[in-house]
Every structure is written in structure tokens, then in C-alpha cells.
Amino acid sequence: MTHDRNWQGCVFIGTSLDGYIAKPDGDLTWLTDPTPRPHTIGSAAHPALTWENFYPNVDTLVMGRTTYETVLTFHAWPFDGKRVIVLSRTSEGDERVQVVRSVVEARELLSYEGAGRVYIDGGRTIQSFLAAGLIDEITVSIAPVLLGRGSRLFGDLDRDVLLTLRGHHATQDDGLLRATYSVQSR
């Protein structure tokens, strides 16, 4: 966490081995409903975060418009009890979310409202927060699939971003390789 803000920006996301977070049409079934097959795993003395020990410690979510629109297609709203901010220049949102127009506006709102641990979700939103130096932790679950095209997790960077590995492990049922990193401040 940087000294000029009181909240921690955290990413928890799945990606294909070649770095895509969604197919070109937005399809996520390769991640949410993978083809069953046997995987071999080893043990890790320091496992990465899992959804079960990441999400309960989050008090606020920030997502982009595309991610918000995807969430609206889910059977039920998955973020009950959490504050949700949508970063969008065009969407008006609904009563469950607050819309902000820029990363600067989101940062100010998070600080003003006393956010603690903030889950940053959505490819472009993650890229924007990373470029602004507002990501402190990244957990990536790498799926055993190559998509070849789609929406990339990380875009071009204007500088190196140094990461420190905090934990890692694989899961046998889905073959996901998980890693949690601390992002080194500038």
C-alpha cells in the first residue's frame, strides 16, 4: 500500500496460459466450466490466495463497464454486502453500484469513503489502475489452455513493474496454476 492512500488495490483474475482473460466474444466457459481431465500437482509451502480466502477480506470492488455488463448476465448478483464502483464514461449503472468516470475519481472516492481492501476487476480497469500505480497485489490463476486471441490481461506498459512472489500452488481438479504477487511501488 502506498503512503498517499489508505486502501489496498488487489487483483484476483483468471487467464489462459497465453495471457487472455476472455475470448473475442467475451466467452469465459474455458475458465468457468473447463473440460475435465486429470492434472498432476505438487505441494506448495506458501500457497497463493484462493477465492475463499481473498473475497471475504474485500470491502469494495471496482470494475469496468464491460465486466459490469457481464455480471448483469449472471443468474444472481454476486456482490451482495460489498460496495461496487463501476468505471465508465457511458454507463449509468443501477442502485447496486456507483459509477465514476475516471481512475482519478475512483481513487478519490475510495480514499474519501475509507475503503480498505479493494478488488480491481476487468482487463482495461486493471491496466488503468496498474498504470496509475494503484495495484498492490495480483493473484493470477493460469488455466491450462491456449486461446490464441481475445482480451489480454495486460497491455503495453511504459515501465517495468516489479513483482515479488508471495505464494503459489496448483489445483488438481482444474489444473489451475495460481500465483500471488506483491507489486513493488515506484
Image: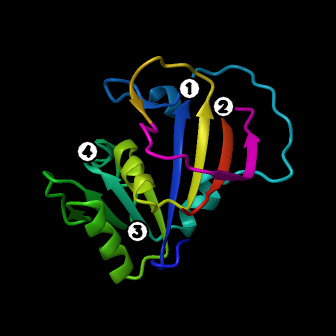
Q: Mark 3 or mark 4: which comes first in sequence? A: 4
Q: Is residue 57 above or below residue 139?
A: below
The N terminus lies in which quarter of the figure?
A: bottom right
Residue 174's disc is: 2
The residue lying toward the viewer, choosing from 70 and 164, is: 164
Residue range of the region highlighted in magenta in the rendering:
153-174
Which type of secondary structure does the marked residue at label 4 adopt?
helix
Distance CA(mark 1)–CA(mark 4): 23 Å
Distance CA(mark 2)–CA(mark 4): 26 Å
Distance CA(mark 3)–CA(mark 1): 28 Å
Distance CA(mark 1)–CA(mark 2): 7 Å
Residue corresponding to mark 4: 69
Q: Quadrant of residue 57?
A: bottom right
**Residue 31: where, in percent of width, then height?**
52, 31
- Asked if the residue under mark 2 is in contact with the one under mark 1, i.e. CB atoms within 8 Å, the reply is yes
Residue corresponding to mark 1: 34
Q: Mark 2 or mark 4: which comes first in sequence? A: 4
Q: Residues within 10 Å of mark 3 (few under 14, many from 20)?
A: some
Amino acid on which disc 2 is placed: Asp
Q: Mark 3 or mark 1: which comes first in sequence? A: 1
